[in-house]
Amino acid sequence: MKIQKDIFINRRQILSRKIKDNSCVIIGTNPLQARSKDTNYSYRPDSDFYYLTGFSEPHALLVMIKSSGVLTSILFCEERDSFKEMWEGEIIGTKRAKSLYGLCDAVAIDIVDTQMPKILAGLDRVYFSMSSLSKLLPKINHWNEGVSKTRYQSSAPREFIDIDFLIHEMRIIKDKYEIDLMQKSADIAATAHIIAMKKCKPGM
């Protein structure tokens, strides 16, 4: 399926108009869930993360920086690995992710801990999901502490705001892309029910 990146670019722009300037939005996705030993369940990304990116791989983080009214969107994700892809399937990688999803940049998730303090340096506030408080807050605190160790003589963000309400408010009103998907889903379900009814007869 062709990725309609303009949809996700537009959603990020709408969200950027809802947040204050000199701020950063951090949204992670779901981890893999083990089924047994070395087998995982089919992967499903975090709904809010997918809503803003269209990216459906694990081990990823969306960072949006709003400074002087300009939005910069960065995706931290896995780099391509031919050996890993042989066993687990194709990985999009940073180069293709930047182009496919209309991002300002895509960076290897392996260096997120060294890059995030640089990104946070000098910003006033961070927006993130309080519903994922247990998994994201320790990371943000760690990155904040690292700001003082960067070469940038700046202070770390001191204000932390829940992003859930802003994103969920956006998601209440469906855009054309979502309406088309919902219609397609309804059409498939309706067709299946009609076929089932035609096959039914007394005694079945």
Image (cartoon, grey):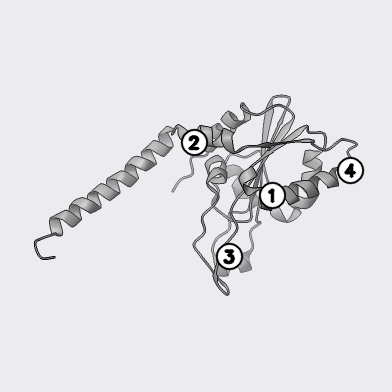
Q: Earlier in the sequence, mark 2 or mark 1?
A: 1
Secondary structure of the residue carrying tag 3 is helix
Of badges 4 and 3, the one in the foreground is 4
Q: Amino acid at mark 4?
A: Ser
Image coords of residue 32 (percent x, y): 58, 61
Q: As displayed, is residue 104 above or below residue 43?
A: above
Give the quadrant of residue 174.
Answer: top left
Give the CA separation, mark 2 to mark 3.
33 Å
Q: Nearer the viewer, mark 2 or mark 3?
A: 2
Q: Nearer the viewer, residue 90 or 70?
A: 70
Viewer-closest of 2 and 123: 123
Query: In 3D space, how far apart are the residues under numbered discs 4 and 3 (Cα atoms)?
Result: 38 Å
* Disc 4 to disc 1, C-alpha distance: 20 Å
Q: Which residue is tagged 4?
A: 148
**Res. 6 visible in picture:** no
Task: Establish if 87 lies above or below 70.
Answer: below
Three-letter residue code for mark 2? Arg
